[in-house]
Image (cartoon, helix red, strand yellow):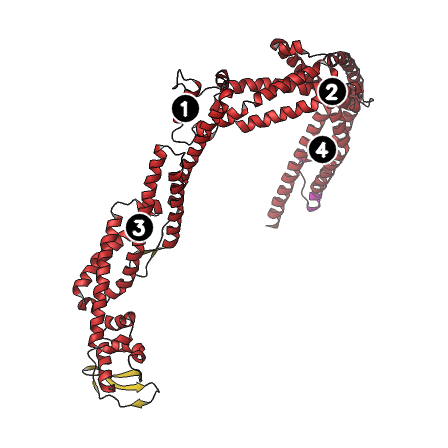
Amino acid sequence: QAEVLLAAAACLVVADCQRVLRAVERRYAAMQEGIQKRPDDARGMDAQRKLIASVDADVAKLDAVVADTTARLEALGEVQVRAPDSVMRDALAARLWPGRIATTTMEAQTALDLLSEEVAIKLDAEKARFEKDLSALPARVMAFYSLGGAELVADPVQFSKATEEALELHDWLLLAAETAHDIGERQAILGQQVTEFDRLHSLQQDFAPFHRLWSTADQFETLQETWLQSSITTLDPELIDTKLAEWEETMSELESTLQREGPPGVVVDALSAKLANFRRCLPVIEALASEALAGVRTDKPNAHWEQLGRLLRPDDPEAYAEDRPTLEQLLELKVLDRLEEVEDIAYRAEKELQLQNLLHELEAKLREVRLDVRPHKDTGTHVLHGVEDIAAVLEDQQVRVQTVLLSPFGDADTQEAARQWKAMLEQALELFALWTEVQRAWIYLQPIFGARDIQKQMLEHGHRFREADKQWRRAAATAVSVGNVADVAEVPGLMQQLQHAWVKLEAIQRELSKFLDEKRNDFPRFHFLADEELLEILADSKEPERVQPHLHKAFDGLSRLEFTETERGRELREAKEAAAQEAALLPPGSTRGGAASALATSRTAGG
């Protein structure tokens, strides 16, 4: 068995060694392939040199792995196990790889030396061509010192051509800078002195103000055309103002730089004038591209555009009812001459939108306020909490509605909507005020008429309470299902339902007061007890112990009654004075009459 285990372990060692040797061979083969690659430019040569520089360290690591693996295979002989010949041949082949890599590295280094001379010759030729191209740049840059003047500014074709030339030269300078940087990097790789191309950097600095001038002109002309051709309601006045301010700042900076140079200064002046002229359009854009006239949220944008149509196009006042004009069309109609009237229409539209937003916010607020409906004890129904907070919200919204109603800017639809909200809020306040009264009465009466003894003594009113209870429970269920203030105020029939319940509950409370007065007339000492205390006694009249907490109020001299269980029931045995001294004040007697009977017996015995 030991021999079998030894053979199995040896097989595992051999298999692992074979796996390691094959992996090492693949690494060597990949290393050799990388070294043998022939680069075709300076950067490829640089990468190749770095690879060759790292070869010795990588070979040393791999050779150490091969040596360790060979030692493991040779160690098998100590336990009389011989490794397969194929595995030993793999180990031997792996030990030969460092020599092969060294030979390959020497060949690659020789090839790199030869290639370096070839690449250097090509780079010198490329540099010469580049310097020749650069020699034409100073004249092109200098040409912009004299490019401009009144004639060029007045000729759109020539102005556009000058702009294109400036942008093209700027792109060429950028490309030249990239080329110069690339040539310098390759020179450094080849060990050559890096050419600085100082003249190129100087030309870039000289041309920078001209590029700012003509690129600004190009941006303005392009965007101005877009703005003029766009529908006025789609324009962004803030963006336009930002761009104009940016260009105006550029012109201000260029005035001090180019004004002295002659023709370019004329371009600066002309472009500054164009910017100032377009800025005159900004109030029109701000007025007519506003949210109120853009029709994003306002309910009736057409009415204001009809006013603008009558103002600007009296021959066709419906022209803007559906289609909005472009800025260019408005300028052709001399809108700037009617700016004050246009701004007045826009102002009224904005105010109208604000009123509509107030009503939108009002509705959103009411739908946001949730009804705080909670289960009430073990009654199986719910009661409403936080009615005061709801009333405060409703009153705040009444102020909003009043603001709309008193405003001179609301149209007929807005005013009608405000009147409807006013009526709704008044009804909601009335509803929750009534809800509070009904809920308070129900909470008071529910435990009273839940007692059977009270029901027996007030049969007719107990029936009425059950009807009111059903109406209250339906109202509470409505509050649970609806959930928010706005919706509950719109539930049809809810107000009438609560009113009917209130009529019944109010009548029951009056009759309950009469009932208690009758009990006090029957037993005058009940006058010393509050309604709640008297109802506690009457609610379970068969339990005489219920009188105990109230004895000291009904009788000054008594603190407690003691009862005895007999065959006839619970009988009053004796009464204890307040000083806790027992006295046979009462003759033994039956108290099967309950709590009220016990108090009556106490009155008879105690004088």
Q: Magenta stretch: dominant SS?
A: helix
Q: Which residue is mark 1?
A: 307
Q: Nearer the viewer, mark 1 or mark 4?
A: 1
The disc, 2 or 3, on the residue closer to the chain's N-terminal end is: 2
Residue underneath mark 3: 430
Magenta-drawn segment = 75-93
Q: Nearer the viewer, mark 2 or mark 3?
A: 3
Mark 4: which amino acid? Ala
Going from the N terminus, do you reach mark 4 or mark 3 first? 4
Of mark 2 and mark 4, the one earlier in the sequence is 4
- The reply to whether the magenta stretch includes residue 88 is yes
Q: 98 and 508: which one is in front?
A: 508
Q: Position of residue 75 (x, y in %)?
A: 71, 44
Residue shown at 24% from the left, 59% from the top = 505
Are the residues flagged by discs 2 and 4 in contact, CB closer than 8 Å?
Answer: no
Quadrant for the C terminus, please: bottom left
25 vs 427: above or below: above
Q: Which residue is mark 4?
A: 94
The residue identified by callout 2 is: 204
Kindly indicate the quadrant of the structure image that contains residue 140. top right
Closer mark to the observer between disc 2 and disc 1 = 1
